[in-house]
Image (cartoon, helix red, strand yellow):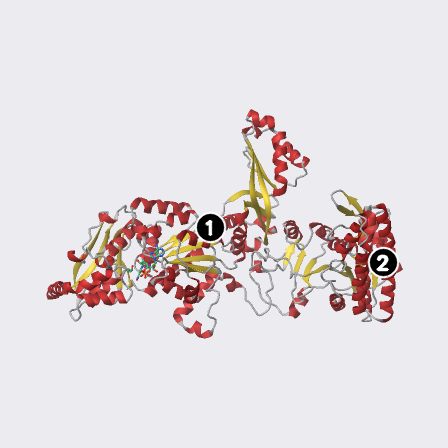
Amino acid sequence: MWSLAVASPHPAAAFAFAAGHPLRHRPSAASDRDANSQRWRWERIRACSYGSSLRIRHLPGRLYGDVSKNNLTPVTVEQAEASAQLPKGDMWSVHKFGGTCMGTSQRIQNVADIILRDPSERKLVVVSAMSKVTDMMYNLVNKAQSRDDSYIAALDEVFEKHMAAAKDLLGGEDLARFLSQLHADVSNLKAMLRAICIAGHATESFSDFVVGHGELWSAQMLSFAIKKSGTPCSWMDTREVLVVNPTGSNQVDPDYIESEKRLEKWFARRPADTIIATGFIATTPEDIPTTLKRDGSDFSAAIIGSLVKAGQVTIWTDVDGVFSADPRKVSEAVILSTLSYQEAWEMSYFGANVLHPRTIIPVMKYNIPIVIRNMFDISAPGTMICQQPANESDDLEACVKAFATIDKLALVNVEGTGMAGVPGTASAIFGAVKDVGANVIMISQASSEHSVCFAVPEKEVAAVSAALHVRFREALSAGRLSKVEVIHNCSILAAVGLKMASTPGVSATLFDALAKANINVRAIAQGCSEYNITVVLKQEDCVRALRAAHSRFFLSKTTLAVGIIGPGLIGRTLLNQLKDQWKEQLKTEAEQADLNKFVHHLSENQLFPNRVLVDCTADTSVASHYYDWLKKGIHVITPNKKANSGPLDRYLKLRTLQRASYTHYFYEATVGAGLPIISTLRGLLETGDKILRIEGIFSGTLSYIFNNFEGTRTFSDVVSEAKEAGYTEPDPRDDLSGTDVARKVIILARESGLRLELSDIPVRSLVPEALRSCSTADEYMQKLPSFDQDWARELKDAEAAGEVLRYVGVVDVVNKEGQVELRRYKKDHPFAQLSGSDNIIAFTTSRYKEQPLIVRGPGAGAEVTAGGVFSDILRLASYLGAPS
Ligand SMILES: NC(=O)c1ccc[n+]([C@@H]2O[C@H](COP(=O)([O-])OP(=O)(O)OC[C@H]3O[C@@H](n4cnc5c(N)ncnc54)[C@H](O)[C@@H]3O)[C@@H](O)[C@H]2O)c1
Ligand SMILES: N[C@@H](CCO)C(=O)O
Ligand code: NA
């Protein structure tokens, strides 16, 4: 995705638009593909900005498959259903439907239909209460405890809700049986709540008993709904079967042996091939009703799945499966087709709200796959969580399965020389943290042992810091510890993937993506299991970091926010080439340009990890900002020659910064417009060639003038034509004075390693002495015809000698100097053969000594210059990770 913003000093000509992405709206008509020039361009854009489109084919509808295997192909509903691999034979197929799936009578009917479609012979379905019912039940208990009589009305509401659903769903005898049970339960509850109200207190088991009714009712309704279709079906009150031992910290441990015994007994009494079981509720070994605590229905399904050694446990929910990243933060996130148990574990820990880690443990033991599927889109095959699939690809990209983030963290850094080699320091630190009940999320200690750093939730850090100051008061005052420091507003970004363990380069790629997005890493942790690499960053950088890393590993779109400064001739042409509807927006949304505001606007959108400013002015003051922009991590691209031909010390400072940073500075269009001059020179130097001399016609304007000034038109007419054609600088005196050529000579000289200033280059100016004081370009153009006769004479002299006039620039690397001159050349000389605005540049090098390497072609003009800038933007995209 691209974002464009444009700045100009003229109120009418300045505008900015942030989130547009013209390149995305590739003119898709086949006719566009046929237009050759367009075709190249759009194909390149796709390659760079939509790298994923090379690998991922979109069909109308959804996108399935495993992007990490680079074989993401769309599938039909039938293929999707087949690929869900329902268990065969007499193995139990366990399903779990959460509250949302059981939200209304219609949804309960849909659940019944899904179960009936499962071809497995034996099906065990775990259900939650209808949505909101568990909260309503807790509310009843709370009201009764606080002696609020409205619990009676609230209980009526619960009754009404279930009665209405049952009436919609069931009829005849089934309805009557359900309603009579509902009546009995509700009057029972009323009595119990009254007792709670009188006591003003509910024990945990009372409360659990009340709350668990939601599941009892939903399970019964569903079992009647299935029976309605003629399929025998029983319902199971899991308090008769599931035995758990409460542990501390609001958790329970299943007693598998006892539960298995009770399950066998239950089957002996009520053999059935389709069973609807209550989620969430269970019993203690002493037969006291209890629950598996919040979100416990997934856990119920996993425990039951392991007890019956199910072929598969399917968790039905309202999302398509586990995404490669939070889709609210990364719109390109993809559904993962498979995840190993450990990966799912890591992801669920990191807040990918799909499964609680403890859900995975019971099924993992028997290698039972868990499939997460969307009940509201059964064509989606979902995510299968199973043992590490054997056939996974070895690509680097396949190693990172997903990214997760945790916000609202603080880092604590305990530092000092007194820790090294002293056993017990870590124990003392974390002992103090434990004493205040804080949860340590990540720990990092470098082997020099001079500091220990760890992350805790922001809300717990004050207590942690206070406890550490108390615990280490003595060490701090004696100087053995230098500080206990808190760094607020941090986030964690974690890359998760089992195969990271055996693949070199994963962390390098991750950190490279972060560096290119100019994101500073505060701390790093990777356990030797290597299932996850955790980095701590500033919270404000977190979404950008996530997007930068995700796009790097998933080859999804490389996103780039592009700010264009100066919608003049070149800027406008570039915008046209980018194909955005920019003109309309300029009319309606223009505002006075303010560079600082503009840069802020470009940077503030967290959805774009990478930013580039394209300077399409000829302004020195704009160029003076490049240093600061690069320092901020904003890439710079420009056809403006001012920075590279300005004061040498500033140029050197800029290049030094750029080389030391991960930010890019491209300026191909400063010499020869779109012609590959800078890149050719770079290529020669980087491969070890030695530049001896660069000589050529560097001015499109002067080339045009001398190619066309042949005696038929006056000199001033030809100058006007060059200006009209868009070859000249904004002020054509820059061309005719030779300054523009001198700047190009300086740019190439510095690129070749010479340390020259603009003033070191002798220049033959073509601006007559008398016109140098003109205050405007217009005045100059008006007065120019009075010198036409002088030019006619100079031309005649040359012609008489069989020669032509050519304005040339020379970089003499051997003698470390440059020249800019008007010279005469014989008519058969290559420089005499040019036409239009052609530039010709001859590189004489150690390798190209006898015959120079020559680059020739139009070296000025809006289209070719903007094309050169565009090409730099694409090069940047590929440097940032878009596949080339
Ligand atoms: N014309 C060519 O063939 C060619 C070839 C190579 C390089 N270039 C370079 O491209 C650049 C643009 O040339 P052009 O012909 O489009 O010029 P132009 O005068 O048509 O456009 C320059 C734009 O920049 C705006 N601008 C000037 N100062 C500004 C500032 N301080 N802040 C914001 N906006 C500002 C102007 O309002 C104008 O919209 C120049 O540096 C030129 O040397 C041109
Ligand atoms: N004015 C310049 C534009 C290209 O840099 C020229 O005429 O060559
Ligand atoms: Na060029």
Real-space Cα distance between discs 2 and 1? 63 Å
Q: Is residue 825 left or right of residue 685?
A: left
Dot 2 or dot 1: first in sequence order is 2
Q: Amino acid at mark 1?
A: Lys
Residue 220 seen from this side: yes
Task: List the residue tagged with mark 1.
Answer: 516
For the residue pair 62 and 732, the one nearer the viewer reads as 732
Q: Quadrant of ligand 2?
A: bottom left
Q: Secondary structure at mark 2?
A: helix
- Residue 300: give x, y in percent of width and height: 76, 54
Which residue is painted at 72% across and 52% down in the image? Answer: 359
Which residue is painted at 41% across and 69% down in the image? Answer: 38
Pick out the residue farthest to the front: 149
In this rendering, the label closer to the viewer, 2 or 1: 2
> Dividing the picture into quarters, in which one does residue 395 lie?
bottom right
Quarter of the picture containing the C terminus is bottom left
For the residue pair 660 and 154, the one nearer the viewer reads as 154
Q: Secondary structure at mark 1?
A: helix
Neighbor class of circle 1 (other Cα within 10 Å; few <14, some 14-19, many 20+) is many
Task: List the residue tagged with mark 2.
Answer: 186
Identify whether 472 is placed above or below 306: above
Q: Amino acid at mark 2?
A: Val
- Residue 341: give x, y in percent of width and height: 67, 52
- Residue 62: give x, y in percent of width and height: 60, 66
Q: Is residue 797 left or right of residue 845?
A: left
- Residue 831: give x, y in percent of width and height: 21, 62
Q: Is residue 223 left or right of residue 635?
A: right
